[in-house]
Image (spheres, helix red, strand yellow):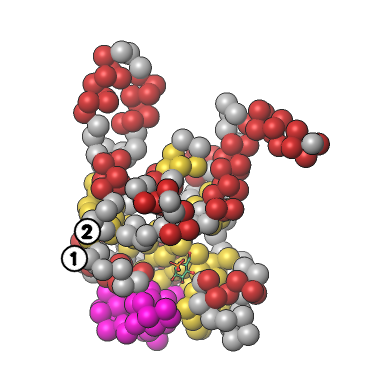
Amino acid sequence: MSNARLRKVVFPVAGLGTRFLPATKVVAKEMLPVLDRPLIQYAVDEAVDAGADTLIFVTNRYKHAIADYFDKAYELESKLAKSGKDELLALVQGTLPRNVRCVFVTQPEALGLGHAVLCAKPVVGDEPFGVVLADDLIWNGHSAAGRPGALRQMSEVAFREDAGVVAVEEVPREDTGKYGIVDAESISERAARIRLVVEKPKPEVAPSNLAIVGRYVLPGRIFSLLERTKPGAGGEIQLTDAIEDLLHEKPVLAYRFEGTRFDCGNKLGLVKATLHMALNDAQIASDTRAYLDSMNNS
Ligand code: G1P
């Protein structure tokens, strides 16, 4: 992986978002907003920050909103232009930099995360690529704060070490059954070489409490491994199981990224992310703080 950079990032967005029903009857969960931007925008910004120029959305037939969101909005743009609303126009046109293209592939059946990633094979080919799960919002201030997003941090390590890299974070032991869990040997302050990875183990058999969160940098080789991966936990084709196979061929590192992760796949996580962004938003930070204080005192 050494002389190249991360160009392609896959966004599996075909999930049903059942934790946010009934909203997700019509709104893809990746379109749920944190303040004024949908989750998928944060995810895409992180990929672009990492250098990506090809974004591959693995979607299902109900998720047109994501394609529409990144497409040109002719009518809206011309109205805003005519009425001189330049700031709003810049927001509408700024969802994607000009050099970045989107490719949409469908996952005909919901057979698991590994299967979703495999659907991107014809677009990714043989090169290293990123995977971003948009409902894990990882915030490090990004370019605006002059700090690299999690995916950029990971891709730098991946290319330098010629390794696969997955983002990890410690979780409470009782939560191991929600995540891929790694057993890893530390090689530096933030990186550890994975010895073993298990999908959603019960706390009593989990090898540790170090959980994979929704960021991966993987070699193209993972596709061949996914092609022969049998259904695993929950009867689904698991990316974690293909990564376990990859370990026997090539180093895969668990990386403790710099930044804060919000699990926006559930209500509390979405509320926390919203509060965090509100408290860092120049326009509404002080009113938000005042409101929170008033709740404390009531
Ligand atoms: C998926 C992966 C799991 C990972 C998690 C991170 O699970 O299968 O290994 O820890 O994402 O969010 P899901 O949340 O889709 O059940």
* Residue nearest the observer in this picture, 107 or 150: 107
Is 235 drawn above or below residue 162 in the view shown?
A: below
Residue 125 falls in which quadrant of the image?
bottom left
Name the spot of residue 247 as percent of width and height, x first.
Answer: 42, 82
In this rendered view, identify the residue nearer to me: 81 or 109: 109
Identify the residue position indicated by label 2 in the image: 105
Q: Is mark 2 within 8 Å of ligand 1?
A: no
Quick check: marks 1 and 2 in contact, CB under 8 Å?
A: yes
Q: Residue at x 60, y 43 (%)?
A: 276
**Some atom of ligand 1 lies within 8 Å of the CB belonging to the residue at label 1:** no
Specify whether 70 is left or right of 263.
Answer: left
The label number, if any, that marks residue 122 in the structure image: 1
Dot 2 alpha-carbon crowd within 10 angstroms: few under 14, some 14 to 19, many 20 or more:
some
The image quadrant of residue 57 is: bottom left
Task: Give how far across and how far down residue 67 sits, in percent.
Answer: 26, 46
Judge from the rendering whether residue 85 lies leftward or rightward of residue 198; answer left or right. Answer: left
Q: Which residues are magenta?
A: 223-252
Question: Residue at coordinates 34% horizontally, 57% vertically from top-left?
Answer: 13
**Where is residue 148 shown, x and y percent of the image?**
49, 49
Q: Residue furthest top?
A: 83
